[in-house]
Image (cartoon, rainbow, N blue to C red):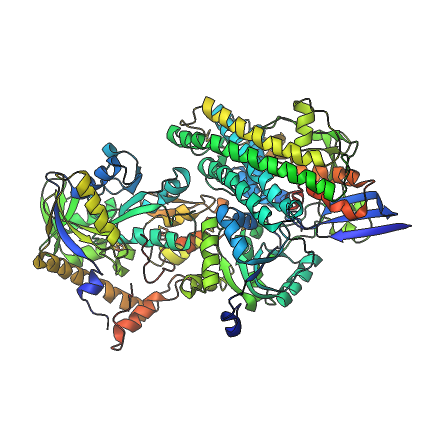
Amino acid sequence: MFYRDKLSFEDEEFKLKVGFLHFSSCSGCQVAFFDMFEEAVEILDTVELVYSNMLTKRRDLPRMDVAFVEGALCIEDPHHLHLVKELQKKAKLIVAVGGCASFGGVRRLSCGNQLPQPQHQSFVPITEVDLVKPKVKYAIPGCPPNPSLLYSFLLALLEINEDFLLPFELMTFSTRASGMDIFVEVVNKGFCVGCGTCSTACPTRAITYNYECSRPAFNPGLCVYCGSCLAACPQSFKPYPQPTYT
Amino acid sequence: MKKIIKLEGIPLTEGHSGLFLEVEEGIIKRGFYYALVPVRGFETLLLGKDSRVAPTITTRICGLCQVTHAIASARAIESAAGIEVPPEAEKLREVLGLAVRIYNNLLHQIIVSEDLFPEKREQLAFIREVQGVRKFAGTVLETVGGEIIHSPNVKVGGISEPLEEPVKEKLLLEIDRVLEKLKNSFSVFRESLEALWKREGLSEDFGSHSLGYFATDLYYGKPVSFDKFTFLLPQELLEGELKRRVTNLFPLFDGKPVETGPRARAVLFKGYTPRGGVKELHLLRGEENIEALLRIREILENGKFDGELWNRKTPSSDGETLGVGVHEAPRGTNVHAVKVDKTGKIVYYKIVVPTELNFFAVGEALRGISATKAEYVVRAYDPCIVCAAH
Amino acid sequence: MVALNSRFLLGKYREAFVVDGKGENPIKAIFTLMLKFGLIDGLLTVSKDGNSPRLIFKAEDVEIPVRNSCFGVNALLKKAVQKYRLSRLAVFGPACTFDGLNKTQYFGIGCNWTKTAVALKISFLCPGVLTDTAFLSEVVDITGKRAGVSRFYFQKGKLHYQLKTGEEITVPPSFHHRYVNSACRYCLNLSGKGTDLTAVYLKERDKVLLIVRSERGLSTLAQVQRSSPSTLYFRKADRKEVESLISFLKEKVILNITDIIERVELGFPVPKWNDNKLRKFYRLWNSIDVNSEEEVF
Ligand code: SF4
Ligand code: SF4
Ligand code: SF4
Ligand code: SF4
C-alpha cells in the first residue's frame, strides 16, 4: 500500500494531494511546516494542499493521498471520534507528525478535570488507534519536528526514498518514547559512544551531557516524550550507505 | 423569521471552533464564538510538578505564540517565589515576545491571504515576501530562545543562554533590510485588505462593538490583579449539546466582557481613537509588527546581554501567595497565576489567554452584520483556539 | 564476502599523505589557517585532553584532542548551527561523531538545517576511546604505575601512549579492548569512513598520516596550501605506512567482530529502532555469497 499506485506513476500531471489535520495539539507541528519559510512556498506549489484548517476554506475532509496528522486523540471528545473515522475513510496514507501524534508527547501528562469540560481526561497518539493504525505508515519525532526534517521528509516522500523513510516506518511500531529510551535502548545495552547527539536533539534540554562519565544525563521532569533523542542517536539507526555532502 | 445557525469549523483560523448565531432576516441578532478542541488540562497537569519545568510545559499550550506562555509562566513563578530576575533577562524576554509577535501576526496574514488575493500567483508572491520577514523573526527566536517553536531557554529566574555581542550584531545587521521588506508587505496587505472590503461590500465599521478595552503594556506586560477576573462557564451561557462540547471559559474583567489585543494596546497606551469595526484590527496588527521590530532594534542596540542572565535560585514559597505573570502576547494580554509550595511544587495553576478574553468581543462584533459574513469577523480577531482551550 | 581488507577496514580513499607541520600538529595548523583565511567560520571539536567539547571561532584559540578521548562533540552542534548560525563549520572527532553528524544532516532530526552548515569533516583514526578513569586503570594494568596519558599515536601497526611522565608505552590490543568505552567494542568504523579526511597520529608530534577520502577534502588541502604554502609539507605515504595501519585495524576489528558475534549469539538486546543491524552483519559475516560492492558499515 502506498500513496501512488503503478498507473499514476507514469502520469506527468500527478500532484500529490496532501491534507493537514489536527487532533489535540498545539498547532506547532503545522506551523513548523511554515517555518521552512521560502521553501514552504515552493512546496505549496508542487503539491496540492486539499485540506488544512489554516490554509484552505473547506469544512469537510476531502479524499487525500497523504494526511499529515498532528496531536493526540482525546477519547472523550465526540468530534475526535468522528474525525478519526473520517480520516480512516478519506486518507490513503497517514503520517503522524510530532511527538503528540506519534508517541503521545506532552499529552501523556494530561489528567483532565479542568473546567469547563473536566471529562476530557484521556489522550492517545494515533499510532495506538487500531482503526487507522494500518494506514499510519510513518511517524515523525520531535516537538515540533524541525523544519529541515519536515523538508527532507517531504522530499523523500515525493521521491519515494525508501532508505530515508524506513526509520520513520519503524517508529510507528513503538507508541512510546521518552528520554529514558536513551538509557534503556542505548546506554544500558552498551551502545553509547558518548557523541552527545541526543542532547543536541532534545527540544526541551531534558537531556544534557555528563562530561565526567561521557554519557548523556536525563532529567525526566523536562521530558515531553517527543522521541527526538533516540531518533537522533547514531546508534538507533543509521543512514546506509553513509552519506557525504559536498 | 428567526433562525439559529450553528457553524462548526471556521476555515482559515487556527484550531477547531464554532459559531452559534441567532439570525433574523439574514442579520445576526446574537452570536457566540467558542472553542471545540478538547481541554488538554494544562492547569491540572502541572499540579504537583516542580515549578521549574512549568515554562517548558506551558510553552506547549500553543505552537503559534509559544514563547508567550513560557514567559508568563516564568514570571508567575518568579513572582510567587520572590525570585529576582536580571533586568537584561527581562529585556531579552521582551525581545522574544516581540519576535513572536511579528512571527505570529505574519502567519495570520498568510492565513487570511486566501481571502485577500483572488489571484493565486499574487498570493504566493505575497506569502514569499512575508516569509522572508518571518524567517528573521524565526532567527531571533532560535538564536535567543534556543528553538523557533517552544523556546527552552526561557527559565524561571531568567534566560539560560547569554547573547554574545557578535551574535547580537549579526541580528542587528539584518534589521534594516527586514524592516524594508516588512513595510513593503504591509502596504501590499493594506491594499488588498481595502480591495477585499470593497469586493465583499463591507462597511468601514463592519464588526464594531461597544465593549471596553483591556491591556497592560505596549510591548511586554505589567502586573495585574488576578481577582479582577471572573469566568462564565459554557454550561451557564449556551444551550443544548454545546454545554457539553464547548471547551473554553468566558472570562470577564472587572465583571465586564472586554476586548484585548492590538487595538486595546493602541487605545490604552498610544492614545489611539478607535474607529470601530474589524478592519482596523488587521491594520493595527500590521503596525504593531513594524513597531515591534523597531523596539527589538532599540533593545538590542542599547543593551549588553553577554553576562549571566539567569538567577538559578530554587523557587520556593508558602503555597498561599498567588504569583501572577503577565505577558502581552500577539493577541492580547496573557496571564498565568500560580501558587508554589515550600518544596517548589506547583499547588495551583490558572491561565487566562487573550483569545479566551476575546470570545465575548467576537460575539458582540457579530451583532448586526449579515450572517454570511460572520467568518470575516472571526478571522479578524486571529483567534488561537488551542490557547483558549489550554 | 566481508573480508578484512583495506576496503572494509580503511574504506574508500583517494590519497594518503604524510603531512609534516614543521613543529606543529598539522591538523591544528590546517584549522588555524582555515579560520585565519575565512575558509571556515567555526571549529567544533573537544579540548586537548578530550574531556569537553569546544566551539572555536578564532584562529588563535584552536585546540584539538591528542588523546584517544573525545566525547560529546555533538552536544554543541545545536548551538553552533542554531545560535551562532555558522554555515561553514569544520568538525574534528572520531568516526562516531560523524555518524551522529551525518545522520543529523541526512534526516534533519533534532537540529535545524545542519545539512548545509558543515564545510569540512576530519576524523582521527580511532583505537577506541577512554575517559580519565579508564585511562588510569589501563595504564596501571599495563605498567603497574599510576600515570596520566598525554597523547596517543600509531607506530609500526601498534598503538602507543605517551604518558604525562614522558614515558612512551605500547598498548597491547587485548588489554586495550577491555578498557575502552563499551560501544567501541562493537565499532566497525574505526577509520572514520564518511568523512572528508582521516588523520592518523604518528610518533612525531608534528606529523600525521592523512587519508583523503573526498573531493572536498582534496580541494580543501589545496586551498590551505595555496593560502600559506610554507606551513605544511606533503609527501605521498608509501605502501608500508598504509599497510601497518591496516594491520592495526585488523587486529582490533577482529576483537570487535568476536564481540559482535557473541552478542548476537547470546541474543543481547539492540535498540528498538535499530532494524537489527548487528544481526544483519552477523549474517553477512557468515555467508559466502555477498555482493562485495555493497557498503555495509
Ligand atoms: S508535538 Fe509538540 S509541537 Fe507538535 S503538536 Fe505536540 S506539543 Fe505541539
Ligand atoms: S528527552 Fe528530550 S528528545 Fe527525548 S523524548 Fe524527552 S523531550 Fe524528546
Ligand atoms: S546520541 Fe550519542 S551520546 Fe547520546 S545515547 Fe546515542 S551514542 Fe550516546
Ligand atoms: S572506536 Fe568507534 S565508537 Fe569508539 S570512539 Fe572510536 S569511532 Fe567512536
As rendered, which of B24 and B318 lies closer to the eye?
B24
Seen as rendered, the residue at the extreme right is: B1
State how many labels appear.
Answer: 0
Query: Which quarter of the figure has residue C275?
Result: bottom left
Image position of A100 with respect to C78: above or below: below
From the viewer's perspective, tell me whether residue B313 is left or right of residue C33. right
Query: Which quarter of the figure has residue A58?
Result: bottom right
Query: Which quarter of the figure has residue B367?
Result: top right
Residue B319 visible in rendering:
no
Q: Is the N terminus of chain C in the top left, top right, bottom left or bottom right quadrant?
A: bottom left
Image position of A108 with respect to B152: above or below: below
Q: Position of residue B232 (x, y in %)?
A: 77, 40
From the viewer's perspective, tell me whether residue C285 is left or right of residue B160. left
As rendered, which of C177 and C297 lies closer to the eye?
C297
Image position of A8 with respect to C71: above or below: below
As rendered, which of B240 and B379 lies closer to the eye?
B379
From the viewer's perspective, tell me whether residue A222 is left or right of residue C247. right
Write the residue at 37% across / 63% down.
C270
